[in-house]
Image: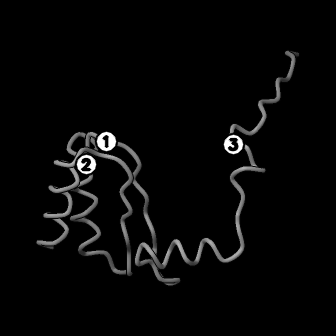
């Protein structure tokens, strides 16, 4: 039987903690309401990773969905916004 190694949480929970009321104000800033289903994409290379497919799929989603995108180049962001606005 091998030795067990415990890997501690990679996030400093004292520094990155939930502040009461903060989440709600952040969500309001992003235009997210309580009933929204939120999907988050973090990255770049939108074309290769299919961000445009996600946007198109959400346009016909049966529920109120929001796609929050973090990252990308200014060109990728412009293209993603253009697709979303067309749909």
Q: Residue 40's image quarter?
A: bottom left
From the viewer's perspective, is residue 42 above or below residue 62?
above
Indicate the quadrant containing the N terminus: top left, top right, bottom left or bottom right. Answer: top right
Earlier along the polypeptide chain: callout 1 or callout 2?
1
Q: Residue 17's image quarter?
A: bottom right
Rendered image: mark on residue 11: 3
Does residue 32 appear to the left or right of 15 in the view shown? left
Q: Looking at this view, is 42 or 55 the one in front? A: 42
Q: Looking at the image, is mark 3 or mark 2 nearer the viewer?
A: 3
Q: Marks 3 and 2, Cα distance to the nearest angstrom?
A: 29 Å
Q: Looking at this view, is 45 or 28 the one in front? A: 28
For this orientation, the residue located farthest to the top is 2
Earlier along the polypeptide chain: callout 3 or callout 1?
3
Q: Residue 65's image quarter?
A: bottom left
Residue density around tag 2, few if under 14, some if 14–19, many if 20 or more, within 10 Å: few
From the viewer's perspective, is residue 87 above or below residue 75?
below
- Look at the numbered disc 3 and give the secondary structure of its residue: loop
- Look at the numbered disc 2 and give the secondary structure of its residue: loop
- The image shows residue 25 at horizontal and vertical percentages of 55, 77
Residue density around tag 3, few if under 14, some if 14–19, many if 20 or more, within 10 Å: few
- The image shows residue 87 at horizontal and vertical percentages of 15, 73
Q: Marks 3 and 1, Cα distance to the nearest angstrom?
A: 23 Å
Q: Residue at x 25, y 63 (%)?
A: 55
Earlier along the polypeptide chain: callout 3 or callout 2?
3
Please say if the residues under marks 1 and 2 sit with CB atoms less than 8 Å apart.
no
Q: Residue at x 25, y 75 (%)?
A: 60
From the viewer's perspective, is residue 41 above or below residue 4?
below
Q: According to the image, label 2 marks what residue? A: 50
Q: Marks 1 and 2, Cα distance to the nearest angstrom?
A: 10 Å
Q: According to the image, label 1 marks what residue? A: 44
């Amino acid at each position: 039987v091998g030795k067990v190694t415990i890997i501690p949480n990679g996030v400093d929970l004292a520094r990155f903690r939930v502040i009461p009321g903060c989440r709600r104000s952040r969500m309001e800033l992003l235009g997210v309401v309580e009933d929204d289903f939120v999907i988050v994409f973090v990255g770049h290379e939108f074309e290769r990773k299919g961000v445009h497919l996600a946007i198109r799929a959400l346009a016909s989603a049966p529920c109120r969905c929001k796609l929050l995108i973090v990252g990308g180049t200014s060109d990728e962001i412009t293209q993603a916004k253009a697709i979303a606005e067309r749909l």
